Amino acid sequence: MSTTHPTTVAVIGAGTIGLSWAALFAGHGLRVRVTDPRPDLAEAVDAALAEASPQLARQGLDTAGLADRVHLARDVADAVRHADVVQENGPENTAFKRELFAALVREAPSHALLLSSSSAIPSTAFTDGLDDAGRILIGHPFNPPHLVPLVEVVPGRRTDEDSVTRAVEFYRAVGRVPVVERKEIPGFVGNRLQNALSREAIHLVEQGVVGPSELDEIMVNSLGLRWSTVGPFLGAHLGGGPGGYRHMAEHIGPSMQQMWDSLGRPEQSPEQTERLIRAVEDAYGSRSYRDLSRERDRKQLAVLGALENAISSEQDEETRS
């Protein structure tokens, strides 16, 4: 195990996600080696860095010499030879990832973390048969990772706990928000939530309840704003007022169950409801409703203010042009 901080990162695959990772890593001063069979790799890297540079600068990063820290590698072996961390961004194909990670285990230094940006395939699915699977795990970002902070850190059945710790530390060091998920499930958490919402959005449009633009307007001006500052559970906890999630579940739960029935969701038993209430109370019950709601409101006003400023700036630019 390496006890030094990572200095060199290999980015395998230079699609949208890989190029964004490369820009982020370079923005944090890391030496980045990129490989991809695409014939326009050099042009793609240059364009991605040029586009990301002002966005990284707005995050307070020093982008001077950004391109000097990103190097093109001849192939996978060349990219990972001196890597401390490898971020794989290949196709969502189990057989492909199995073959690639066998090569990564073989070619990368023994201390290197081997991370996959896989959007849906758990690492256990492509590490069977590998002798050194302890350092392989999922580091799934949301696009583009140089702007969106979340990284889902998902260990496989054979991933070492030390590798989980090192992955969390690495992503925090490059300004991301890593969240460890302790049970493998296809799609992980973020994409499953996104897909569930997408399914219902499509259903509502297909049923003629609302049009696509109206549905987007509803999201942007309600749930999108709320969820940019609090998640579904904290939002529901605050929706219950001083009584919190328990009050919400007791008073709104029956009507919500009627809606869930129409969606085919199994009825929740009283025991399940109580376990969920206690889990939410354990997560947020140590802070008062007043403190949590004030923090939510400050963040929501900040988001609204930033959006208004962005619109005003865009209008000013259009006027000048």
Image (cartoon, rainbow, N blue to C red):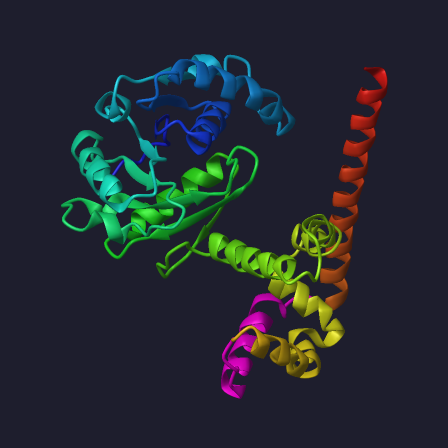
The picture quadrant where one finds residue 303 is: top right
Looking at this view, name the residue that lies furthest to the bottom.
270
Q: Position of residue 10 (x, y in %)?
A: 33, 27
Front one among 20 and 113: 20
In this view, the residue in front, 102 or 83, is: 102
Residue at 47%, 36% in the rendered image: 173
Question: In x, y percent, where is residue 255?
Answer: 67, 80
**Is residue 165 depicted above or below 47 in this figure?**
below
Which residue does the image show at 45% across and 39% down from the upper left? 171
Horizontal placement of 226 versus 260: left or right? right
Position of 320 with respect to 115 (left or right) is: right
Q: Is residue 12 left or right of residue 70?
A: left
Relative to 303, residue 311 above or below: above
Q: Is residue 8 left or right of residue 56?
A: left
> Residue at 38% of width from left, 18% of height from top?
41
Q: Which residues are magenta?
A: 265-287
Q: Is residue 285 magenta?
A: yes
Taking depth in this image into account, of 34 and 219 the one nearest to the observer is: 219
Residue 131 coordinates in the image, percent (x, y) = 14, 45
